[in-house]
Image: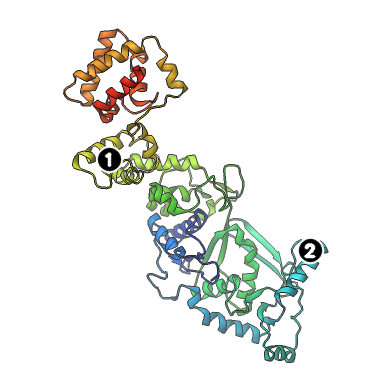
Amino acid sequence: MTKEVRVRYAPSPTGFLHIGGARTALFNYLYAKHHNGKFIVRIEDTDIERNVEGGEASQLDNLKWLGIEYDESIDIGGPYAPYRQMERLDIYKEHAEKLLEQGAAYKCFCSTEKLEASREEQKARGVAAPTYDGTCRHLSAEEVAAKEAAGEPYTIRMRVPENVTYDFEDLVRGQVIFESKDIGDWVIVKANGIPTYNYAVVLDDHFMEISHVFRGEEHLSNTPKQMMIFDAFGWEYPRFGHMTLIINENRKKLSKRDESIIQFVTQYKDLGYLPEAMFNFFALLGWSPEGEEEIFSKEEFIKIFDEKRLSKSPSMFDKQKLTWMNNQYIKKLSLEEVVALSLPHLQKAGLLPEELTAEQHVWATDLIGLYHDQMSFGAEIVELSSLFFKDHIEYDEEAKAVLAGEQVPEVMASFKAQLEELEEFTPDAVKAAIKAVQKATGHKGKNLFMPIRVVTTGETHGPELPNAICLIGKEKAIDRVDKFAQ
């Protein structure tokens, strides 16, 4: 490539970093790094009524957490600053004046009420996508001056060229064609002087020398409007690529109101998902490598990324695949790292104190170690280890079936006796006690182990039994046997 690759992720601080935004940022990042280019984060904050406190920080902080490092932005600067749109208003104003002077745009004095009435009238005539009716398109200079002198508020509209075909080779979809006759004259500057998205984005992309634009397919219909602005100034287009929708497991478009899927990156972070796993998962959400391998490091993704392998079909957000993938990464962590990931969740749930004694920390480490290979995310430790914190056990139907065995009272009476005689309460000692029960009662296999597991843990499946009983503690284990016998 002769021109430096410069791509951008341009979020609006009207919300926190969403999984769709994270994927867009990630594909732009991978494309830039694969081609030794630059990845820019630009904040599009012109929708001032909808901007939320913390939205900007959420975007930047969570990108960094995911490992998506940017080269230029509001916090680190860069040669094309400022990177926040509200700090670039003079640029938009200057170029809007140029469009007015050359007749590519005009001032529109139509009121909100008139515009709404026109839309309703078009709908009544069966027009599926109402457009501006052109009332102010042909106002004379004198008429415009008179309205301005009278203090009438106005917007600035783009004068859509007639009989123009806008076609481009989309990096994902191939050839895309739009006709100007289907696009009404659209507002580039609102009455309050703030530019609209489709106008400002073009100036920013041009002056920041953006070479490629990868974004969601919802922006596809914006492309011809943006091409008009590029054309009006005689500027070169960037290459466009529109990624497919993310859908849920019911194959419906992912909506921010869809409560079946966790939507925001910070929520995954708070639940104890690993950033490396999230990076890996997002990279496969609408892009596929060659071969069957699915686990890659960031460096490997950068090396193998090829925009030609971006999917043309909707990408399903597979929750089970995400938890499986996160589990693969957790398995590779040291026990110390897993404790750091999951211990805060036990403390937050009130199961362990905020300040642990040395003895409590050893106990918690042993407890978490039982579930190291099983855990899919940090917060899952609360549910996985719940048996160790219960004062009262409720047996489910499967457990009751185990306890209905005729040998169970004999096994449990013998096991209690063995526990009471133990001076050291270690996994090896508990294992020896179970062997002694087998020798004393003649029961073995499931008839021996299952009743002991169900009575002491309340569960029919779980971690290594001697380890679990040891962590439950001698006193609590005997108490559970006593309560069963009552």
Amino acid at the residue labelled 2: Lys
Q: Which mark is residue 253?
A: none
Considering the numbered disc 2 on the image, is that residue within a helix, a strand or a loop? helix
x and y percentages locating residue 71 in the rendered image: 40, 66
Crowding around mark 1 (Cα neighbors within 10 Å: few <14, some 14 to 19, many 20+) is: some
Q: Quadrant of the C terminus?
A: top left
Instruction: Depth check: give the residue in front, 288 or 185.
Output: 185
x and y percentages locating residue 361 in the rendered image: 23, 41
> Residue tagged by mark 2?
123
Residue lying furthest front: 486
x and y percentages locating residue 426 in the rendered image: 21, 26
Amino acid at the residue labelled 1: Leu
Q: Is residue 465 visible?
A: yes
Whole-angstrom CA distance, mark 2 to mark 1, is: 64 Å
Instruction: Depth check: give the residue in front, 404 or 11.
Output: 404
Q: Kindly indicate whether the residue at mark 1 contacts the one at mark 2 (C-beta within 8 angstroms).
A: no
Residue drawn 55% across and 71% down? 201
Is residue 208 placed above or below 347 in the rendered structure? below
Crowding around mark 2 (Cα neighbors within 10 Å: few <14, some 14 to 19, many 20+) is: few
Q: Residue 232: which quarter of the image?
A: bottom right
The colour mode here is rainbow
User: Horizontally, is 187 left or right of 202 in the view?
Assistant: right
Q: Residue 41: which quarter of the image?
A: bottom left
Is residue 319 placed above or below 115 in the rendered structure? above
Residue drawn 25% across and 15% down? 435
Considering the numbered disc 1 on the image, is that residue within a helix, a strand or a loop? helix
> Residue tagged by mark 1?
335
